[in-house]
Amino acid sequence: MKQKVCSFLRIPVDAVLIAIAALAVPCAVLTAYQLPFPLVPLIWAAVLIGILLSVWMHVPKFGWIAGIAFFAVLTPLLIWKNLFVRYGFLLFRYAILDLLSPDVPFLPSPTPVEPIDGFTAAPEAAIGWFALLVMAVFGLSIAWSLIRSKMILLPLIVPLPIFMLSLIYTDLPLAHWTVLLLLIYLGGCLIGGGLRVSDSDRYGLAMLPVLLGLLVLGVLIRTVSPPEKYEPISFERRQEIIGERVRELYDGVRNVLNNRVKRTEDLTDEEEWHRTGDAILEAKTSESGEIYLRAYSLGGYRNSAWYSVSPYPGTWKSMGTLGGNAARQNENAGETMTVHAEASEMLYVPYGFEPSGMQLSESYLAANDVTEYSWSYRTVVPTATAVSEEEAAYLTWAQEQYSISDSSVKEQIRAFAESAGIYDTGDNLKTARIVASFVRTNGTYSTTPGKVPEGTDFVLYFLEQSRTGYCVHFASATTAILQSFGIPARYVFGYRFFTTSGASKTVTDEMAHAWTEVYCPGVGWVPIESTAGADGWQEPDDANETAAPTAAPTPEPTAEPTPEPTASSDGETESEPTEAPQETNQPLPTERPDGDGTDGREEEESQAPSTTVPIKLWWLLWLLVPPAIVAALLGTGKLVRDRRKKLFRQKNAREAVLAMYRYQKRMERFGASKSETAEELAVEATFSDHEMSEQRRRMHSIIKSSLAQLGSQPKWKRFLYRHLLFLT
């Protein structure tokens, strides 16, 4: 009995949410453009729409009666009042164009709306009937997304495109009660979304206090801060605010993509090197020549991807040995470098820095919000010293962590290397140079090598078949071959560029580079370069940097005596590099030269016509919402399907069977036949520890059968399954 009551409560709860959204969103647009409309009739209409649609979508056997009633009531009314609807649409269109056409060149000028021949109606009534049509269509989409789609995000997305229409012209604020209702709807969807999908029986009972609490919260906010106290903001100021927010969002997204530490590098996506020319940092050095600036490293190789290794539990700090221990013994004067970077998760580190007083991790140095810092470094030749017990313990750990987890792939890579005449010489650095020379000599540089065939290991495909790629391919192959010999090696990402002494260098994503680090006992981590050809290495033409070399360095010198700097320390900080002094003549990465200076700007301003009015186009941002939603759905679908394939093809057959079983149960909710065999296989996979290759194949056959069943359904359902539910 209690379960029936809880299930029944879903109907009124969702009816309230549908009614709120159906009323709030259209009315927000009408109030924003100061169009008169009868509020009370629309409230009753929203209640009716919410009840009929909620019953229709929830009740399995007789819900269709409510659906028929929905169309039977609204369709005749709208047909009977079609002149009202048409007149209301014309009034709505006139209001939009009247406000926006002066600022938007491609919009036509509005023409006065004349009453239709033989028809007279008050504008308020006509707009009310037009709003009823919008509410009916919009309510239907809300009801389906909320109840039938079984997606948590879709009910949150559906109202936004229409609601954005109310924010285009910000001189006319929308009614605050519409914002309150929309927030109640979004809050209800957000809080109850997961419960609605996972435990629908408790959803109705749990949502009653949620909706009541949201209503009380909204009333309290309105009481404490009534709209009358709000200070209006001019249209121009709002334009500036929106522009600032958009720029901040763009910069934030760019920084997240360019300046974060990757924990995984999926090599199957490396079919083309994409470059945008975005600035990453500014570097200024006291030397001229080639610089390797390190960002982070990845160590474990499996399933054609590099993964970060777990932190070393001991006291040995391997990041302090970058470039070799000899850097600490060289007391000669070195070079200096200052770095100004956008907000980044890591510091950009040269080789051979002095690690005294720094917080060191295994693969990168945390920036801790530092964006300006300096290094001092020295060019050294790695020289072996005695291996301490502390370093020996680290070396044992590194041999386990920096390795290829798939024994089959490891043996194939080692067999290929030995067939090519490459063997472990017993000297890690010497072996690394031999491997790098082979990879570099036998590969061809290309920024468009194409995608690796599905089911083929990335490194093996590069070594045995394509032998074409860019730095990611060469560095991955070199690192994997060394790991196949049991030599600690890791894949490194950073930037490779050329500098001129005393000149500021803008480092862009076009200078991004990957290389290998090999651990040499008694020396430390030493960089190894193996990328072939100068095609992707040439320095961009720059009149101010004529001294910079343009050809690729010779193989041996680039691998060993890479500039090995030391971080400067003046005693003021113990946890991070010292900040470089501010230089008034050094522009930030976002600054640009002023060209001819102030005089040129004044001349330009004087030539501008005094009657020029700036075009206000920020409202066009709302046009980005629909394509953004489409792009998000397509991108999400691809990610979901790729992840599903990886789960099904993973090495652990038991986990693969369980992943396929969960997928099968989801398809059963949408029309696939229930499989008793799938239940048995899932139980076996849960409690058995034997090899399950045959069970994997049987479960895969069940999945294919269920997909065929869904594929036989109507086209509109197949479209929803693929692009909205990501089911097929």
Image (cartoon, rainbow, N blue to C red):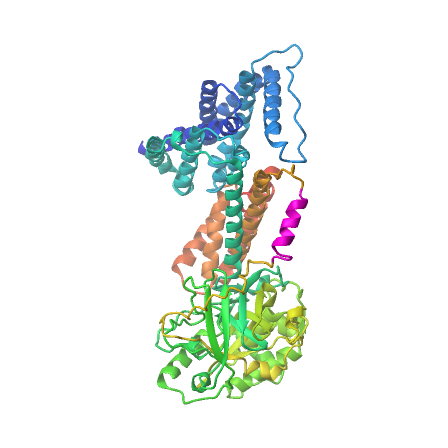
Can residue 15 be seen by looking at this rendering? no
Q: What secondary structure predominates along the stretch shown in magenta?
A: helix
53 relative position to 538: left or right = left
Residue 475, relative to residue 18: is it above or below? below
Q: Which stretch appears magenta?
A: 594-608
Q: Quadrant of residue 711?
A: top right
- Residue 487 in picture, x, y percent from top left: 49, 81
Residue 381, relative to residue 720: is it above or below? below
Q: Residue sitting at 56 percent across and 22 percent down?
A: 130
- 6 or 325, nearer to the observer: 325
Residue 630 in magenta?
A: no
Q: Quadrant of residue 331?
A: bottom left
Q: Residue sitting at 41 percent across and 89 percent down?
A: 386
Residue found at the far left of this picture: 2
Residue 310, relative to residue 323: is it above or below? above
- 1 or 536, nearer to the observer: 536
